[in-house]
Image (cartoon, rainbow, N blue to C red):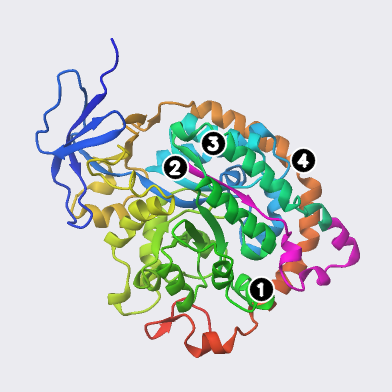
Amino acid sequence: MAKSPMTVIRGGRVVDIKGHSAPLADILVKDDTIAEIGTKVAAPDSATVIDAKGKLLHPGLINGHTHSHGNLAKGMVDGVTLELLLTAGPYMSGARTLEDKYLSSLIGAAEMVMKGCTAAYDLAAEFPMPTAEGLAAIGQAYADVGMRAMLAPMVADTSFFQAIPGLMDQLPPPLQKAVEAYRFSPHKASVAQMKKALHGWKLDRAGVHLAVAPTIPHHCSREFLLACLKLAKDYDTGLHSHVSESKVQVVAGYRLYGTSLTAYMDSLGLVGPKFTVAHGVWLDGDDMKLLGDKGASVSHNPGSNMVLGNGMADMRGMLDAKVNVGIGTDGASCSDNQNMYENMRLASMVSKVQGPDNRLWITTEEVLHAATAGSARALRLGDRIGKLEAGYKADIVFLDLGNINWIPLNDPTNQIVHTEDGSGVHSVMIGGRMVMENRKLLLIDIAKVAKQAEQARERLAKGRKPAKALYDKLEKIVNTFCPGLAKQPLHIDRFGGAHFHYGKGDGHGHAH
């Protein structure tokens, strides 16, 4: 007998984010879409019945910014700045086989689903350029776990050492020669591979789509940025870039272009409704207004921003400027986990330590909206996912109200953001299909994944010794030059003494 296209979820408590409540309700699902939510919803006798008694149901969380290649590198470093992390990239994430790329993506997707996340914007890196085969393998991992993804190859045609003004000159000639190995492929080769992947992409039906991610503006030539823009227009994809993540990036932007990185990207035509800024820690008021006026998004990644010492992004300033804000984890190579609950809690806390005026603090409603509907819009899926409403895809997280996190249940909106840590996730439905039930992933074998990951770790550890030795030589130079660059004063006419003004304090915790 064919499986009924109807499923009814009975007896659960469906969160009302704005109402800070969770009334008892049934959810009727037809195929992959919510058809109706209400009390005692009628369903055909043939419908599959899911008993949600004792469960709190919320929209699947949506990770607005991550890196699948980071999952095999989780926990490898501590005490590194963003610039040191970029220097360490070749030894942390280099020499990956096609199987490694698939496995790293699989690990991340599994962790996200197990922690209540049903979709992600993944900026996956391959060196020296993206490949259609690599992207297909990474995307297949999401499909195999049953998770949605917007997969954006992270591309550049300028190495980190070339991109930071003056850094290459600080390297002695032997090291200058050594880092030549870190050159990316010419941008035309990368564009050709992205075009090949976009043209032949077969995973849309599995909920895995492609976008384009020029990694950091000054790591891409002007010609490459324009080529990425053309790809996005030709294939109607999103654009995603790390913008003003660190102060070093801001200083580099002014030295290279005489403007902020946001203004530079806008001058080339990249800023618009399809554009997502990753991090945006050092965006100023003009940047935020520009992004808001153009309908762009920012993925706020508070955990990573703190781990790398980049500062605290001004989410209130972004929202006031009408910027669409999502929440992300960043990659596990620097954030060390893929826990969206943790990053929601941090997004709330970060806003509260930036000043004593609680009228400026981000509310739990705003955080939970950002981690669902806000991130959904950044993925350009805002009309399909991010809400538990009729007409939206049935991406539903079932939290166990018997878990200690929910004893007692006082305010579901506050507690999802401030109390839940992922340990209360009981089951997860994506597109009307259960992909995790009673804390067990249904589509992959985690024990097998663990065994494969250990084999990959041992092999990669042996292969990375030369790259690690080079990093050790570069570390002191980068860690002296880049913090020195960050101490340089910014453009006084644009920023002045009020730059990053947050109430009566400095929203970023940095001296003016």
Give the alpha-carbon distance from disc 4 to disc 2, as whole Å: 28 Å
Give the mark, 4 or 1, whose residue is nearer the N terminus: 1
Is disc 1 placed on a helix, strand or loop? helix
Please tell me whether mark 4 sits on a helix, a strand or a loop. helix
**Which residue is at a point 10% across and 38% down the rendered structure image?**
39
What segment is highlighted magenta in the picture? 149-178
Left or right: residue 263 compared with residue 458: left
Looking at the rendered image, the quarter that the N terminus falls into is: top left
Dividing the picture into quadrants, the one containing residue 9 is: top left
Label 3 vs 4, first from the N-terminus: 3
Residue of label 3 = 139
Callout in the foreground (4, 1): 1
Does any portion of residue 512 appear in the rendered image? no
Horizontal relation, residue 218 to residue 173: left or right: left
- The answer to whether the residue labelled 1 contacts the one labelled 2, judged by CB atoms less than 8 Å apart, is no
- Does any portion of residue 160 appear in the rendered image? yes
Label 1: which residue? 252
Which residue is painted at 38% across and 53% down in the image? 377
Residue 274: say if magenta: no
Residue carrying label 2: 112
